[in-house]
Amino acid sequence: MTGGVPARRRVAAQAGLELRLLVRNGENLLVTVGIPVGLLVFFSLVPVLPLPGRPVDFLVPGVLALAVMSSGMVSLAIATAFERSYLVLKRLGATPLRRRELVAAKIAAVLAVQLAQTGLIVAVAFALGWRPQPGVVGTAVAAGGLLLGSAGFCGVGLALAGRLRALATLALANGLFVALLLVSGIVVPLDALPGWLAAVAGVLPAAPLATLLRAALGAGVVAAGPLAILAGWAVAAPLVAAAVFRWE
């Protein structure tokens, strides 16, 4: 307890503020909602990619992973980096709020946004004819994968925002987003990539998340490897973010 207020109350209050700021930002909504839904609709209706089976069945797990990446890494990193540049976080640093509590609050706010994202994407997918039959275990694995992926990407985004200048964070976060979109099996199957590139993508968080969701939601065999990689990112990335984060 610091300043007479329990840590959980400080985190909850800050998370509420972060959530309100996220939903009021039109650019954030475009990145977190518009782009994933737009990609899902376009590539499901326009057969321009060499996808196995029905495009919507392949695309939905990848688009869910993309949504997690866009809100957890890109949107969060850019917003936080500019908060640092405008000295907003410096003022927070003068309050009882600790760095790890700020990281936890921002992750909690992003998780709330991602819950709404997931519901919207699933609703659009059903309208496009998606009919998964994952069962109880598959649903639980998919939910766990989304949580782990969210924590991992939030940690990456906050680590970038906590050390780099705002414009550098903007460029790097967007660059990583495009790169991971292309090489992580989100819209292009991993087996269509060169072997070395698929191997590199396999140890980054986006490809394991898409692979895990595709297996869990498609009644496939869920491998332990992607789950272990996601768990590693979910633990390590937020810890790194909390350790390197600077208020200004």
Image: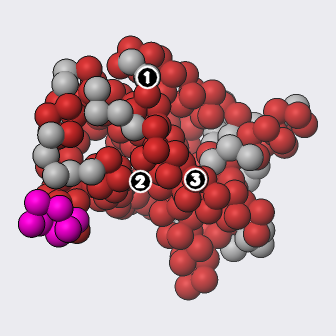
Q: Which comes sooner in the sequence, label 2 or label 3?
A: 2
Q: Which residue is mark 2?
A: 121
Q: Which residue is mark 3?
A: 236
Magenta region includes residue 4: yes
Q: Which residue is mark 1?
A: 164
Q: Secondary structure at mark 1?
A: loop
Comparing 232 with 147, the one in front is 232
Q: CA distance from mark 2 to mark 1?
A: 32 Å
Q: Residue furthest bottom?
A: 136
Left/right of residue 114 with respect to residue 11 in the rendered view: right
Q: Which comes sooner in the sequence, label 3 or label 1?
A: 1
Q: Secondary structure at mark 2?
A: helix
The kind of secondary structure the magenta stretch mainly shows is: loop
Label 1: how many Cα within 10 Å (few below 14, some 14–19, many 20+): some
Q: What's the amino acid at mark 1? A: Leu
Q: Secondary structure at mark 3?
A: helix
In this view, 28 is above or below 148: above
Label 3: how many Cα within 10 Å (few below 14, some 14–19, many 20+): some
Left/right of residue 164 with respect to residue 65 in the rendered view: left
Measuring 68% from the left and 65% from the top, which residue is drawn there?
227
Give the residues drawn in magenta, as a range: 1-7
Q: What's the amino acid at mark 2? A: Ile
Q: CA distance from mark 3 to mark 1?
A: 19 Å
Measuring 77% from the left and 63% from the top, which residue is drawn there?
225
Q: What's the amino acid at mark 3? A: Ala
The picture places residue 142, in percent across and down from the top left corner, at: 56, 68
